[in-house]
Image (cartoon, rainbow, N blue to C red):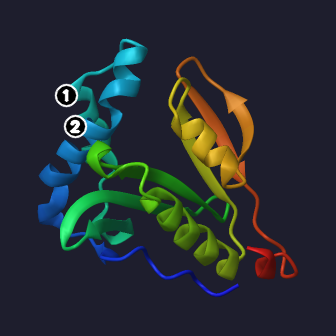
Protein backbone atom coordinates (compact mmCIF):
# COMPACT_ATOMS: atom_id res chain seq x y z
CA UNK A 1 0.00 0.00 0.00
CA UNK A 2 1.41 3.44 -0.83
CA UNK A 3 2.45 5.77 1.95
CA UNK A 4 -0.54 7.67 3.24
CA UNK A 5 -0.53 11.42 2.82
CA UNK A 6 0.22 13.28 6.02
CA UNK A 7 -2.65 14.99 7.80
CA UNK A 8 -2.94 18.57 6.52
CA UNK A 9 0.01 20.72 7.56
CA UNK A 10 2.01 17.79 8.96
CA UNK A 11 5.58 17.00 7.92
CA UNK A 12 8.81 15.38 9.08
CA UNK A 13 12.03 17.38 8.97
CA UNK A 14 15.58 16.33 9.88
CA UNK A 15 16.67 17.63 13.30
CA UNK A 16 19.82 19.60 13.93
CA UNK A 17 22.22 19.99 16.85
CA UNK A 18 20.52 23.24 17.85
CA UNK A 19 17.13 21.48 18.32
CA UNK A 20 18.10 19.77 21.59
CA UNK A 21 16.53 22.21 24.08
CA UNK A 22 13.22 22.38 22.19
CA UNK A 23 13.09 18.58 21.97
CA UNK A 24 13.86 18.26 25.67
CA UNK A 25 10.98 20.60 26.57
CA UNK A 26 8.69 18.64 24.29
CA UNK A 27 9.75 15.33 25.88
CA UNK A 28 9.15 16.72 29.37
CA UNK A 29 5.65 17.88 28.42
CA UNK A 30 4.79 14.59 26.73
CA UNK A 31 6.11 12.33 29.51
CA UNK A 32 5.20 14.35 32.59
CA UNK A 33 1.84 12.72 33.37
CA UNK A 34 3.05 9.13 32.85
CA UNK A 35 6.22 9.69 34.87
CA UNK A 36 4.34 11.40 37.69
CA UNK A 37 2.02 8.37 37.91
CA UNK A 38 4.98 6.18 38.82
CA UNK A 39 6.76 8.81 40.90
CA UNK A 40 9.65 9.20 38.44
CA UNK A 41 9.24 12.66 36.92
CA UNK A 42 12.69 14.23 37.11
CA UNK A 43 13.62 16.93 34.57
CA UNK A 44 17.36 16.44 35.21
CA UNK A 45 17.15 12.67 34.57
CA UNK A 46 15.15 13.39 31.39
CA UNK A 47 17.85 15.83 30.21
CA UNK A 48 20.60 13.30 30.90
CA UNK A 49 18.77 10.48 29.11
CA UNK A 50 18.01 12.55 26.04
CA UNK A 51 21.47 14.12 25.86
CA UNK A 52 23.23 10.77 26.31
CA UNK A 53 21.79 9.41 23.09
CA UNK A 54 20.99 12.57 21.13
CA UNK A 55 21.98 11.96 17.53
CA UNK A 56 20.41 14.48 15.14
CA UNK A 57 21.16 12.26 12.14
CA UNK A 58 18.57 9.74 13.45
CA UNK A 59 16.08 12.37 14.67
CA UNK A 60 13.18 13.88 12.74
CA UNK A 61 11.13 16.79 13.97
CA UNK A 62 7.37 16.50 13.54
CA UNK A 63 5.92 19.79 12.35
CA UNK A 64 2.30 20.88 12.06
CA UNK A 65 1.85 24.06 10.08
CA UNK A 66 5.56 24.75 10.60
CA UNK A 67 5.40 24.41 14.41
CA UNK A 68 7.26 21.70 16.31
CA UNK A 69 4.70 19.29 17.79
CA UNK A 70 6.84 16.20 18.26
CA UNK A 71 9.90 14.22 17.31
CA UNK A 72 10.87 10.69 16.43
CA UNK A 73 14.24 8.97 16.76
CA UNK A 74 15.00 5.68 15.00
CA UNK A 75 18.48 4.26 15.56
CA UNK A 76 19.97 1.27 13.74
CA UNK A 77 21.20 -1.42 16.13
CA UNK A 78 24.40 -2.60 14.52
CA UNK A 79 24.74 -5.77 16.61
CA UNK A 80 21.27 -7.16 15.76
CA UNK A 81 20.46 -5.52 12.43
CA UNK A 82 17.22 -4.24 13.97
CA UNK A 83 16.06 -0.69 14.48
CA UNK A 84 15.32 0.95 17.82
CA UNK A 85 12.45 3.38 18.02
CA UNK A 86 14.26 5.31 20.73
CA UNK A 87 11.84 8.23 21.05
CA UNK A 88 8.42 9.16 19.72
CA UNK A 89 6.88 12.13 21.49
CA UNK A 90 3.92 14.27 20.56
CA UNK A 91 3.18 17.41 22.60
CA UNK A 92 0.03 16.91 24.71
CA UNK A 93 -1.73 19.76 22.86
CA UNK A 94 -1.27 17.86 19.59
CA UNK A 95 -2.14 14.36 20.81
CA UNK A 96 -5.20 12.44 19.65
CA UNK A 97 -5.07 14.03 16.18
CA UNK A 98 -3.60 11.00 14.39
CA UNK A 99 -0.10 12.47 14.29
CA UNK A 100 1.57 9.63 16.19
CA UNK A 101 -0.15 7.00 14.06
CA UNK A 102 0.93 8.73 10.87
CA UNK A 103 4.54 8.98 12.08
CA UNK A 104 4.50 5.33 13.19
CA UNK A 105 3.18 4.34 9.77
CA UNK A 106 6.12 6.14 8.13
CA UNK A 107 8.63 4.42 10.43
CA UNK A 108 7.14 0.96 9.93
CA UNK A 109 6.86 1.31 6.17
CA UNK A 110 10.51 2.35 6.01
CA UNK A 111 11.46 -0.60 8.26
CA UNK A 112 9.51 -2.94 5.98
CA UNK A 113 11.28 -1.61 2.89
CA UNK A 114 14.60 -2.39 4.59
CA UNK A 115 13.47 -5.72 6.09
CA UNK A 116 14.10 -4.48 9.66
CA UNK A 117 12.42 -5.43 12.92
CA UNK A 118 11.76 -2.49 15.23
CA UNK A 119 12.25 -2.47 19.02
CA UNK A 120 10.71 0.00 21.46
CA UNK A 121 10.57 0.46 25.22
CA UNK A 122 7.57 2.00 26.98
CA UNK A 123 7.00 3.06 30.56
CA UNK A 124 4.92 0.39 32.28
CA UNK A 125 1.81 2.53 32.98
CA UNK A 126 1.99 4.72 29.88
CA UNK A 127 -0.82 4.95 27.33
CA UNK A 128 1.96 4.36 24.80
CA UNK A 129 1.71 0.62 25.47
CA UNK A 130 -1.71 0.39 23.82
CA UNK A 131 -0.46 2.57 20.96
CA UNK A 132 2.50 0.28 20.26
CA UNK A 133 0.40 -2.87 20.51
CA UNK A 134 -2.12 -1.39 18.02
CA UNK A 135 0.78 -0.92 15.61
CA UNK A 136 1.91 -4.55 15.73
CA UNK A 137 4.48 -4.46 18.53
CA UNK A 138 4.62 -7.61 20.65
CA UNK A 139 5.63 -7.64 24.31
CA UNK A 140 9.02 -9.34 24.72
CA UNK A 141 10.06 -8.61 28.31
CA UNK A 142 9.15 -6.65 31.41
CA UNK A 143 11.39 -4.61 33.67
CA UNK A 144 10.71 -2.80 36.91
CA UNK A 145 9.66 0.41 35.15
CA UNK A 146 9.49 -0.49 31.45
CA UNK A 147 7.98 -2.90 28.97
CA UNK A 148 10.04 -4.04 25.98
CA UNK A 149 8.42 -4.62 22.60
CA UNK A 150 9.40 -5.92 19.18
CA UNK A 151 7.63 -5.40 15.87
CA UNK A 152 8.99 -8.18 13.65
CA UNK A 153 10.31 -7.42 10.20
CA UNK A 154 7.67 -7.92 7.55
CA UNK A 155 8.37 -10.63 5.03
CA UNK A 156 8.28 -9.65 1.37
CA UNK A 157 4.69 -10.88 1.03
CA UNK A 158 3.48 -8.91 4.07
CA UNK A 159 4.63 -5.47 2.99
CA UNK A 160 1.60 -5.05 0.74
CA UNK A 161 -0.77 -5.62 3.66
CA UNK A 162 0.10 -2.47 5.57
Quadrant of the rendering where the C terminus is positioned: bottom right
Q: Which residue is mark 1?
A: 44
Determine the image quadrant of residue 59.
Answer: bottom left
Locate residue 25 relative to residue 106 in the image: left or right: left
Question: From this viewpoint, which residue is outermost toward the right?
Answer: 157
Which residue is drawn at the image coordinates 11% and 63% (left, top)? 18
Residue at point 68%, 49% (across, down): 134
Residue at the image position 42 percent from the left and 73 percent from the top: 7
Q: Is residue 29 above or below residue 80?
A: above
Count how many numbered circles sit on residues in the image: 2
Rounded to the nearest angstrom, the CA distance separating label 1 from label 2 is 5 Å
Residue 152 at x, y percent in the picture? 76, 59
Circle 2 residue: 47
Q: Residue furthest bottom?
A: 2
Bin the neighbour count of mark 2 within 10 Å (Cα to Cα): few under 14, some 14-19, many 20 and up: some
Image height check: is 61 above or below 11? above
Q: Is 121 on the left-hand or right-hand side of 1? A: left
Q: Nearer the viewer, residue 5 or 107?
A: 5
| Callout 1 touching callout 2 (CB < 8 Å) | yes
Using a 10 Å C-alpha cutoff, classify the residue at mark 1 as few (fewer than 14 neighbours), some (14 to 19) or many (20 or more): few
| Quadrant of the frame with the N terminus | bottom right
Helix, strand, or loop for circle 1?
A: helix
Q: Position of residue 54 (x, y in %)?
A: 29, 54
Q: Which corner quadrant of the image does residue 114 belong to? A: bottom right
Amino acid sequence: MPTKSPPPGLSLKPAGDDDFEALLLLRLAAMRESLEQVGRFDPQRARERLSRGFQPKFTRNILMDGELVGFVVVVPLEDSGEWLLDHLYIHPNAQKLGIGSWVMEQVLQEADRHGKAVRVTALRLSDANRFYQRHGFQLQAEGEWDLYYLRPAASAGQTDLR
